[in-house]
């Protein structure tokens, strides 16, 4: 067993550059570190979509050493406090709530105070108050156009939890330039052939422009092409189109109606007859796409629907069509090759799992890194953990669909059909019919989405839990009621301290880094 001294990352999209930079930072490239080279093809290019993230990205940027101001300026970035789901429960015009919100902040819980969900289910927050509005002030703050943090808060910190929206191409560019300052060597060349050695491991890749490249460990970041893990090593792809139906996307970028238009600090996900649109507000433009099922509609109708959604701003613009391989490889680390990014798998972008999975895979490679060359145990653990993550994300995404009350198209009735729902999710839903989901339902180390995300979506989709708990197990009704009242009051007070979203973004764009101290309100810090 020879020590791992060299890594070749093949592919330079978000996955390739994020992995290369993170490994350079955490393993070191000098002295006893590892030599990291990244090869990317000028001809093939990157996919260039993927504009919504999950809060984990703040930790990743911080480890990489990219400051928040630079990131916001260079990536045309804005803040994301969650996702607003329009018409997922019922179609437009039907009686009842027309949207729900999935905020990133956890339900408020005072030390020693009651967990709020069971009391919300028993009606302690008042009639008709959505769980997300009752349990955290974030929904109100986001609805009112305010930001999750103040201008003086430190990088990556704020009273409310947040992620970002950004320009995917600019993000890959920023990661590339930063990773090279961390010691990653870049080669521009196209890989034409992958050579295997005697034991079936990858021996080298042969490029058109830069000859043959060898390494101890190869990281396949070649996107949907999966040149190494799929093409050369044949790791099977598990298609999950029978559970998650959407398999095509039409994407378009459009300007705002006016330069000072409010920028939503959440992704707007609107359900349609055969899929859903994402609507993401960057500083200088909106990114909009329709993700749909080719079994339930066709490309012409999808184009028409996207244009209807966007309105006149779509005139004269052509959307980009993307065909999606929906699923993942159950084995993403084979011999001396690890797949990170789209080469490992793709799940629809409903909850921004793509970049989150890249981060998760990168952390795992870094922490499990087999310095001594003993690859098999690290690969085994990595594969088990990534497979479990994918399975849980599939369940979480399906949760958004399977509870719909929509019957206006076969896309929605097929989605609610129990045969399309994974057994693991069906079992959990059965339990939650008579008791609230609890954090012990979740093996938190492999969950990308915390229990609160499941709760917000479950009750946003109006799941009927009929609590059968004995009243003695819920003794804090008065405290819970008081807490709900406090959250409602704070939601209003918060607006005085938190700038509007546009103002915060423009502050970062002007100044890069915060230059003055936080305003005096202690409460926001205490309530984070
Ligand atoms: P790519 O960006 O495709 O990069 C592949 C790289 O491999 C390129 O540099 C290319 O040059 C190189 N390459 C390929 N073949 C060769 C070769 N033979 N030789 C040399 N180099 C080669 N994720 C989110 O987190 N949030 C979202 O909101 C989101 N929305 C999405 C919407 C859509 C429609 C799609 C399709 C995906 C979305 N994703 C989202 C996923 C996200 O886009 C990807 O996870 C992310 O961009 C990473 O892509 P990648 O780096 O794996 O692949």
Image (cartoon, rainbow, N blue to C red):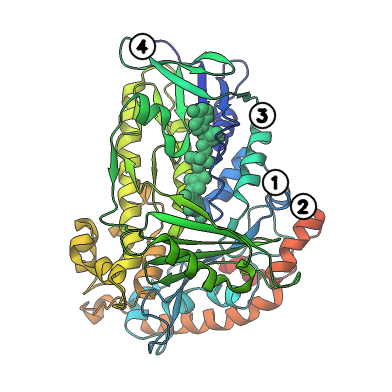
Given residues 76 and 450, the one toward you in this image is 76
Q: Which image quarter holds the N terminus?
A: top left
Which is closer to the viewer, label 4 or label 1?
A: 4
The residues bearing labels 3 and 1 have C-alpha atoms spaced at a distance of: 16 Å
Distance from mark 1 CB to nearest ligand 1 atom below 8 Å: no
Q: Which residue is mark 1?
A: 67
Q: Residues within 10 Å of mark 2 (few under 14, many from 20)?
A: some
Q: Which residue is mark 4?
A: 197
Looking at the rendered structure, the secondary structure element under dot 2 is: loop
Question: Contact, CB < 8 Å: mark 3 with mark 1?
Answer: no
- Distance (Cα) linking label 2 and label 3: 23 Å
Counting residues from the N terminus, which is met first, the one under dot 3 or under dot 1?
1
Label 1 near label 4: C-beta < 8 Å? Answer: no
Question: SS at mark 4?
Answer: loop
Residue at 51% across / 21% down in the picture? 7
Q: Which residue is rendered at x = 36% and y = 18% of the image?
A: 374
Q: Nearer the viewer, mark 3 or mark 1?
A: 3
Q: Is residue 76 above or below residue 362?
A: below
Identify the residue at horizontal 67%, vertical 41% (top origin). 174
State the separation of the CA atoms marked 4 and 3: 30 Å
**What secondary structure is marked by label 1?**
loop
Q: Position of residue 55 (x, y in %)?
A: 53, 55
The spot of residue 353 in percent (x, y) is 44, 52
Binning the other alpha carbons within 10 Å of mark 1 as few (below 14), some (14 to 19) or many (20 upward) gives: some
Disc sitting over residue 216 in the figure: none
Q: Which residue is mark 2?
A: 513
Between residue 358 and residue 526, name the one nearer to us.
358
Residue 399, percent from left and from top: 32, 64
Would you name the residue on which mark 3 appears? 180
Contact, CB < 8 Å: mark 2 with mark 1?
A: yes
């Amino acid at each position: 067993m020879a020590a791992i001294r060299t890594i070749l990352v093949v592919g330079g999209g978000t996955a390739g550059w994020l992995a290369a930079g993170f490994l350079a930072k955490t393993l070191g490239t000098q002295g006893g570190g590892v030599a990291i080279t990244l090869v990317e093809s000028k001809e093939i290019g990157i996919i260039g979509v993927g504009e919504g993230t999950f809060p984990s990205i703040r930790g990743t940027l911080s480890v990489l050493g990219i400051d928040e101001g630079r990131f916001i300026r260079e990536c045309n970035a804005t803040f994301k406090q969650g996702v607003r789901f329009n018409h997922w429960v019922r179609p437009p015009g039907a009686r009842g709530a027309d949207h729900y919100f999935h905020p990133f902040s956890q339900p408020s819980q005072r030390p020693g105070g009651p967990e709020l969900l069971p009391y919300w289910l028993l009606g302690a927050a008042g009639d008709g108050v959505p769980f997300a509005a009752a349990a955290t002030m974030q929904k109100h703050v986001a609805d009112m156009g305010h930001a999750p943090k103040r201008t003086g808060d430190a990088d990556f910190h704020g009273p409310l939890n947040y992620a970002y929206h950004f320009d995917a191409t600019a993000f890959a560019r920023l990661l590339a330039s930063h990773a090279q300052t961390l010691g990653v060597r870049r080669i521009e060349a196209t890989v034409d052939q992958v050579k295997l050695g005697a034991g079936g491991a990858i021996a080298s890749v042969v490029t058109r422009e830069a000859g043959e490249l060898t390494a101890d460990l190869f990281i396949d970041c070649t996107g949907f092409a999966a040149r190494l893990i799929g093409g050369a090593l044949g790791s099977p792809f598990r298609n999950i189109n029978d559970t998650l139906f959407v398999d095509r996307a039409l994407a378009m970028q459009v300007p705002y109606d006016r330069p000072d238009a409010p920028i939503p600090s959440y992704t707007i996900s609107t359900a349609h007859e055969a899929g859903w649109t994402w609507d993401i507000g960057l500083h200088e433009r909106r990114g909009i796409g329709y993700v749909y099922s080719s079994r339930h509609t066709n490309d012409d109708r999808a184009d028409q629907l996207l244009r209807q959604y966007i309105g006149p701003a779509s005139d004269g613009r052509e959307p980009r069509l993307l065909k999606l391989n929906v699923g993942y490889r159950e084995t993403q680390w084979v011999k001396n090759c690890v797949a990170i990014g789209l080469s490992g798998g793709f799940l629809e972008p409903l909850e921004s799992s793509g970049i989150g999975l890249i981060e998760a895979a990168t952390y795992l490679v870094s922490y499990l890194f087999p310095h001594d060359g003993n690859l098999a145990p690290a690969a085994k653990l990595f594969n088990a953990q990534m497979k479990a993550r994918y399975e849980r994300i599939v369940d979480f995404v399906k949760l958004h669909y399977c509870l719909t009350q929509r019957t206006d198209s076969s896309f929605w009735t097929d989605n609610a059909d129990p045969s399309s729902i994974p057994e693991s999710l069906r079992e959990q839903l059965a339990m939650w019919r008579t008791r609230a989901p609890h954090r012990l339902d979740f093996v938190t180390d492999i969950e990308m989405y915390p229990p609160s995300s499941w709760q917000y979506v479950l009750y946003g989709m109006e799941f009927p839990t009929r609590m059968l708990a004995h009243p003695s197990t819920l003794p804090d009704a008065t405290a819970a009621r008081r807490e709900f009242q406090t959250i409602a009051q704070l939601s209003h007070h918060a607006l005085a301290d938190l700038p509007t979203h546009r103002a915060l973004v423009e502050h970062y764009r002007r100044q890069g880094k915060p230059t003055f101290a936080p305003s005096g309100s202690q409460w926001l810090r205490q309530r984070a």
